[in-house]
Amino acid sequence: MLISQVRRPDGGLAVVVRSGSEAAVLRGVESTYALAMEAAATGRPVAALVAERGLGEAVDLPSLLAEGRVVLPITHPDPAHMHLTGTGLTHLGSASARDAMHAKLAGAEVLTDSMKMFRMGLEGGRPAAGHVGVQPEWFYKGNGTTAVPPGGALTMPGFAEDGGEEPELAGVYVISPDGVPCRLGWALANEFSDHVTERVNYLWLAHSKLREASFGPEILIGELPADVRGTSRIRRGGAVVWEKPFLSGEANMSHTMANLEHHHFKYGLFRQPGDVHVHMFGTATLSFADGFATQEGDIFEIEAAEFGLPLRNTLAKAPADAGALAVQAL
């Protein structure tokens, strides 16, 4: 089952449920957030709540997406209470990349901090159920004000050096009234980053990640497949100018999802009742790694069959900064 949100002609939201090619509006609910919080508060599965309410009018979701009426699949009434975060160095990559990585780990006398972090994940990122494994690289991207809807523009700040895609899976969560993290489901995400800035010095990773991001258009409800195979591509002027498959899911990762979730939600800050979290789990596929330079107007496209409609966003760039930002004293 897939869940999305669309904008009604009157400006309100409607929740859309899709199974196969059939999509229809869910009755008796005003938003995905309201549905998720009811499930979190009552302990009832989302699927049960959907079955209880029933479906109304059928909708043509691809047409609504083309019209710009498909919005983020979940939002918070107060955008400051949606957190966009992520983890890196979590994916093994292709078999050849994995073999090359192992060769480097085995033969290198001095490892970079990134290689050390990757090796820590290989050795301790998959603990037995109920046990805590090694913590991953972690970063903060922003709040709901930096979440861009499917079809929207991912905008490079005026000071940015680069605007590059990162095709990832994201977990979508709400925090129950009694402070328990509850996973609604999984979505495609573009963890938009500044790879040129990050390459200057890895200590600038935090700066490179403070960017917009997009996720959706749909949320997969239920278990995540262990082996997710998708495609990431860039279109320019109507033509595909870069394309590559990407792998995700636990079969292609050095950490379990449960371990990554633990190391995010272990902080009380991230267990505040009513908050929404969109946590991105990393990737091994980047156009930047292939030496491809993005341009303003490029269209990023990320798709994987299990997640429904592809996630598309256009690259935009804000005007150059006028100079140093002045802080006003009160």
Image (tube, helix red, strand yellow):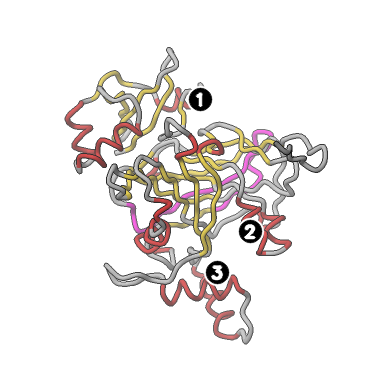
Q: Disc 1 residue type?
A: Ala
Q: In terms of image quadrants, where is residue 43?
A: top left
Q: What segment is highlighted magenta in the picture?
A: 224-244
Q: To which residue does mark 3 refer?
A: 97
Q: Which residue is mark 2?
A: 205
- Is 45 in front, or is 327? 327
Q: Secondary structure at mark 2?
A: helix
What amino acid is found at the position of numbered circle 3 in the picture?
Ala
Say which of marks 2 and 3 sits in front. Answer: 2
Q: Determine if the magenta segment contains residue 238.
A: yes
First in sequence: mark 1 vs mark 2: 1
Image x and y of residue 37, in percent? 30, 37
Does the image show residue 100?
no
Would you name the residue on which mark 1 appears? 66
Q: Residue 66 placed where, x, y %?
A: 51, 25
Q: Name which residue type carries label 2.
A: Leu
